[in-house]
Image (cartoon, rainbow, N blue to C red):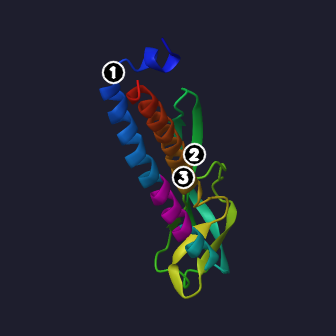
Amino acid sequence: MSYSYFYWKDKFSLKYVMILFLLVGPFVLIWGSVKLAVNYRNTSRCSAEAMGQVVSVEKEDRMTHKGSVYTVYFATVKPTDSSIFSTSELRSDESGYAYEKGEYVKIKYDPSDHSKYFIEHASPSEGPLNLIITGAVLSVFGVIFLFVHKSLKSR
């Protein structure tokens, strides 16, 4: 009795796990790649800079799949030049950086579209990278299950 046969006595369930991984993995990989490309395009256009003052900070504790806790921060920033942006306060993307109230940060924005901006220390690309990694891992496991399924089918 082989190792793979011990874990997959039922070829039927292996087939559905394989199909699920082969469908979901590439979809998540493509979705993450598109989001990364959009984020890159938007941030590369953000060539102008303005200063802003942090008026409030939200702290959010999150749990990893292994049970450890990590903290992310969201800053609400008031631009020093209120004529640049249409709103009086801007919110950052999530960040591992602990903003402090009253701190001054750089706001990078698109000179042709001021609604596209990002705030210093907040990386707009972390989410898509996680999607790309997850999609790649699911795809690899799908291919592994495909080979295991074919070897079990040939018996």
- Residue under numbered circle 2: 72
Given this view, does label 3 or label 2 mark the residue nearer the observer? 3
Please rate how many residues cluster around mark 3, counting C-alpha atoms within 10 Å: few if below 14, some from 14 to 19, many from 20: many
**Can you give x and y, in whole percent of width and height, for residue 138 in the image?**
48, 42
Picture layout, residue 32 above or below residue 22: below
Viewer-closest of 76 and 71: 71
Q: CA distance from mark 1 to mark 3?
A: 31 Å
Dot 1 or dot 3, earlier in sequence: 1
Q: Considering the whole magenta stretch, tell me its main secondary structure.
A: helix
Location of the C terminus by quadrant is top left
Say whether residue 152 is left or right of residue 109: left
- Residue under numbered circle 3: 132
- Residue under numbered circle 1: 10
Q: Residue at x 52, y 31 (%)?
A: 65
Viewer-closest of 107 and 144: 144
**Can you give x and y, in whole percent of width and height, for residue 15 in the image?**
34, 33
Q: CA distance from mark 2 to mark 1?
A: 43 Å
Task: Judge whether residue 32 can be spotted in this image.
Answer: yes
The amino acid pointed to by label 3 is: Ile
Task: Judge whether residue 80 can be spotted in this image.
Answer: no
The range drawn in magenta is: 29-38
Q: Secondary structure at mark 1?
A: loop
Q: Residue at x 36, y 41 (%)?
A: 19
